[in-house]
Image (tube, rainbow, N blue to C red):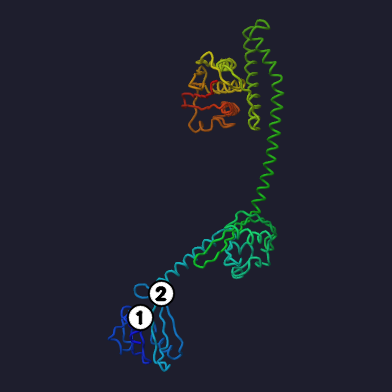
Amino acid sequence: MINLLISVDIPIVIVRTDLIIRRATPAAEKVLNVIPADIGRSINDIKLKIDIPDIEQMLREVMDTLHAKELEIPDKNGGWHLLQIRPYRTEENKIDGAVIALFDIDQIKRSLEQVKDALDYAEGIIDTVRDPLVVLDADLRIISVNRSFCRTFEVKPEGTKGKFIYELGNMQWDIPELRKLLEEILPENTSFKDFEVEHDFPAIGKRIMLLNARQIYREPEKTKIILLAIEDVTERKKAEETLNKAMKELKEIDRMKDEFFTSVTHELQNPLTPVKIQSQLFLDGSLGGLTKEQRDGAEIILMNTNRLIKLTDDIMTISKMRAGVLKYEVAGNNICDIIENSVDNMGLQAKEKQIAIIKKYPESVLVECDKDRISQVMENLIENAIRFTQEKGKITVGAKRAKNDIVVSVTDTGIGISEENRKKIFDTFFQVSSKYGGTGLGLSICKNIIEGHHGKIWVESELGRGSKFTFTLPVK
């Protein structure tokens, strides 16, 4: 016995029935402060390093009842020990005292606390999740549910633990689709996402649910758990249906509007063309001489007719752009002729404000383009420059060859464009200011047409000093 006690690295103290210390292991000296000289002394006379509450009472109870006692106690350094007190039996099987043993459980205790903290933390997260969440074991029995699940499906947490998922809440989860997911699909995969289930639940009625599940392998227990998240998307589905219906109605209205614009512009263009031709015949003298007043009147008619024709062209173009049916009739054209004709067409508007148009472009550069569409771009850019340039201002229309491109620019001495507005200047319906008029279509059309020709368009501007619009087209 003595040799055995000496070899044991556990604090053990054996006391007689009168609480006199009979024997102690060497480890008892270090942990309990029981030294060899204390043998023969009462345990009550020893100042133990670890405070054991009511040690005398516990010893006597163990000896009287023959029932062992266990107690977790801390030491002065914050470590934890498991105290065990058992009856001491002699070789004759008589009770002749008690055995006090102390086991270091500090690491175990702290590990358990960490596990508990982690569990509390995980449960806290689960409880804060707004959507219903269920944790199942491998047999599809419920380990836990969060508050949202209980609130949504009107069940109590204590009534769910250990239950088969299909038995829960009057069998409301005995859904064929869910059975297939959990019993057939999930075992073959680690997860499934956004599986839609429509079901009539007793507590909440007919709902559409999105189910998401993931299997998690628990290494210590060598088992799997299943996290099942349930999202009620009924209202979202209703909103989506309402939105889709509204979108269809809007598209139909948009289609009808485009058809209306197309019809109106056609009806407008039909009488405008002969008006323009007649005005030009008056002005070039084909119909006889004109007085100054008559010439001025004819110029006003031609200028405003050109404006109306341009407006109808822009409306037709934007409608085709929006419908995705704008086509280009590309052929080899002299870009300089297109520029020259556009300048001539806008001459009357420039003359009205006494704005000088300066031409800086060569006689001929051949470009593959849609002549009418590039003319539309040029006239939109020149008209835009006229609109924002004060009377007696200056507009420079230029073009030059740059490697494989022709670079065309329209520069004015107008009011300029702020940095903020430059970012939106090519947006459909954007207007710098309503006081200058315009539809907000012209520059958007320019951008679409130029990009449709594989070119680029941009603007440079300084407030109070003017703007320069530039575009490029590939040279043939």
Side of 68 where 375 appears, left or right? right
- Mark in front: 1 vs 2: 1
Quadrant for the C terminus, please. top right
Q: Quadrant of residue 430?
A: top right
Q: Is residue 409 visible?
A: no
Which residue is depicted at the point 44% across and 91% down? 64
User: Which residue is labeled 2 in the image?
Assistant: 105
Q: Quadrant of residue 447?
A: top right
User: Which residue is labeled 1 in the image?
Assistant: 8
Which residue in the rendered view is the most extreme toward the front? 3
Residue type, mark 1 in image: Val
Quadrant for the N terminus, please. bottom left
Residue type, mark 2 in image: Ile
Residue 164: % across, % down:
63, 68
Q: Residues within 10 Å of mark 2 (few under 14, many from 20)?
A: some
The correct choice, above or below, for 12 with respect to 208 in the image is: below
Which residue is depicted at the point 50% across and 27% down? 459
Q: Quadrant of residue 185?
A: bottom right
Which residue is depicted at the point 46% across and 66% down? 117
**Pointer 1 or 2: first along the chain:** 1
